[in-house]
Image (cartoon, grey):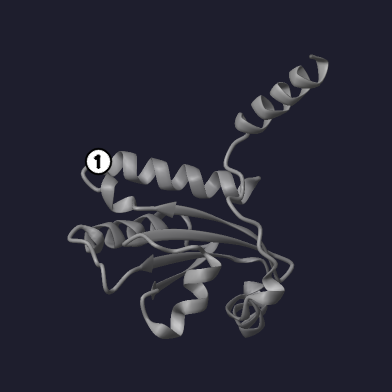
């Protein structure tokens, strides 16, 4: 009985934590991260915002959502993140699709970079569903990114 209470308490503690990395990856196996860090000393501690879309399954509202992401980036993250827009359906991006488990028409992936290494990533799938409420769109994405980068 005591073990069950401890396990339940631990599960509650974990579920109440804010924006955790969805996945931890070791950047030593990600050639894009290594190249990104090596390109400029400024990238050594500057995280990445990927805007991944599926060019073979591009949704009707995806262009508007991507435009809103760029606006949000310019307002809130231009000094903290670098942004890259990538069509992950291309054969050359197969490694990205696997690395970030991409399957939706549009996904945002924030990769935290610290001391030249990836410290995990946080993925937001289907932000195009929120474009009809720009305030919600901005708040949801801004809070998720900030929560992940500050943890």
* 39 lies above or below 45: below
Quadrant containing the C terminus in the rendered view: top right
* 34 lies above or below 53: below
Q: Where is residue 148 in the image (x, y as percent from the top left)?
A: 58, 48
Q: Position of residue 43 (x, y in %)?
A: 62, 73
Residue 15 occupies quadrant: top right
Q: Secondary structure under badge 1?
A: loop
Q: Residue at 25%, 48% (x, y): give it.
A: 131
Count residues near mark 1 (Cα–Cα under 10 Å), then give few for <14, some for 14-19, many for 20+.
few
Quadrant containing the N terminus in the rendered view: top right
Q: Residue furthest top?
A: 1
Query: What residue sits right under mark 1 in the picture?
Result: 133
Q: Which residue lies furthest to the front in this view?
A: 1
Would residue 74 be found to the left or right of residue 60 on screen? right
Q: How many labels does the image show?
A: 1
Q: Residue at 26%, 68% (x, y): give it.
A: 57
Residue 19 occupies quadrant: top right
Q: Where is residue 4 in the image (x, y as percent from the top left)?
A: 75, 20
Q: Nearer the viewer, residue 129 or 133?
A: 129
Q: Position of residue 71 (x, y in %)?
A: 33, 58
Q: Residue at 51%, 50% (x, y): give it.
A: 145
Would residue 92 be found to the left or right of residue 26 on screen? left
Q: Which residue lies furthest to the right in this view?
A: 2
Q: Nearer the viewer, residue 2 or 115?
A: 2
Would residue 123 be found to the left or right of residue 66 on screen? right
Would residue 117 be found to the left or right of residue 99 on screen? right
């Amino acid at each position: 009985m005591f073990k069950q209470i401890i396990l339940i308490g631990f599960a509650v503690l974990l579920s109440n934590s804010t924006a955790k990395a969805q996945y931890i990856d070791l950047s030593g196996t990600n050639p894009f991260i290594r190249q990104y860090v090596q390109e400029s000393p400024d990238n050594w501690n500057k995280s990445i915002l990927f805007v991944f879309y599926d060019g073979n399954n591009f949704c009707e509202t995806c262009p508007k959502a991507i435009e809103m992401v760029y606006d949000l980036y310019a307002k809130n993250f231009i000094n903290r993140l670098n942004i890259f827009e990538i069509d992950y359906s291309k054969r050359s991006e197969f490694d990205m699709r696997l690395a970030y488990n991409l399957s939706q028409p549009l996904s945002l992936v924030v990769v935290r970079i610290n001391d030249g290494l990836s410290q995990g990533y946080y993925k937001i799938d289907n932000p195009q569903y929120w474009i009809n409420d720009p305030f919600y769109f901005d708040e949801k994405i801004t809070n998720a990114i900030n929560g992940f980068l500050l943890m």
